[in-house]
Amino acid sequence: MATTLTLSHPQFIFIFAAVRRSVHKPRVCMLRTVAADERTARRSLVRDYVLSFAGRLPVAEVRA
């Protein structure tokens, strides 16, 4: 039988359109990070990038 692992804090893949703060000629890139919420995801990237939210995807469940 297969069982599904259920996390008490669901994780998501957050996608951001981003521009590096230190570059004089900005170029938009797409960044992905795994976090429980958007605020945590932004915190991990905001020091180096100007971010614009682009999407949120559920992390695939692990099956045993």
Image (cartoon, rainbow, N blue to C red):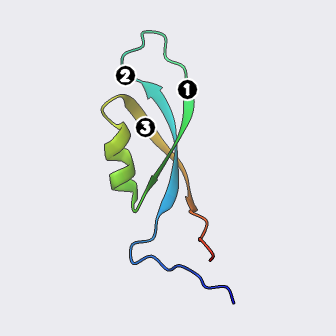
Residue at numbered disc 3: 51
What residue is shown at x 59% (from left), y 71% (from top)?
61
**Residue 42 in picture, x, y percent from top left:** 37, 46
Quadrant location of the N terminus in the rendered image = bottom right
Kindly identify the amino acid type of the residue bearing the numbered disc 2: Arg
Kindly identify the amino acid type of the residue bearing the numbered disc 3: Leu
What residue is shown at x 39% (from left), y 78% (from top)?
8
Residue located farthest toward the right when viewing the structure as drawn: 1
Q: Earlier in the sequence, mark 3 or mark 2?
A: 2
Nearest the viewer among 9 and 54 is 9
Q: Earlier in the sequence, mark 1 or mark 3?
A: 1
Dot 2, crowdedness within 10 Å: few (<14), some or many (≥20)?
some
**Residue 35 in picture, x, y percent from top left:** 42, 56
Q: Is residue 39 above or below residue 45?
A: below
Residue at numbered disc 2: 21
Dot 3, crowdedness within 10 Å: few (<14), some or many (≥20)?
many
Residue 37, located in which quarter of the rendered image? bottom left
Dot 1, crowdedness within 10 Å: few (<14), some or many (≥20)?
few
Kindly identify the amino acid type of the residue bearing the numbered disc 1: Val
What residue is shown at x 56% (from left), y 63% (from top)?
59
Which secondary structure, mark 1?
loop
Between the residue at mark 3 and the residue at mark 2, the CA separation in whole angstroms equals 10 Å
**Residue 58 in picture, x, y percent from top left:** 57, 64
Q: Earlier in the sequence, mark 1 or mark 2?
A: 2
Which secondary structure, mark 3?
strand
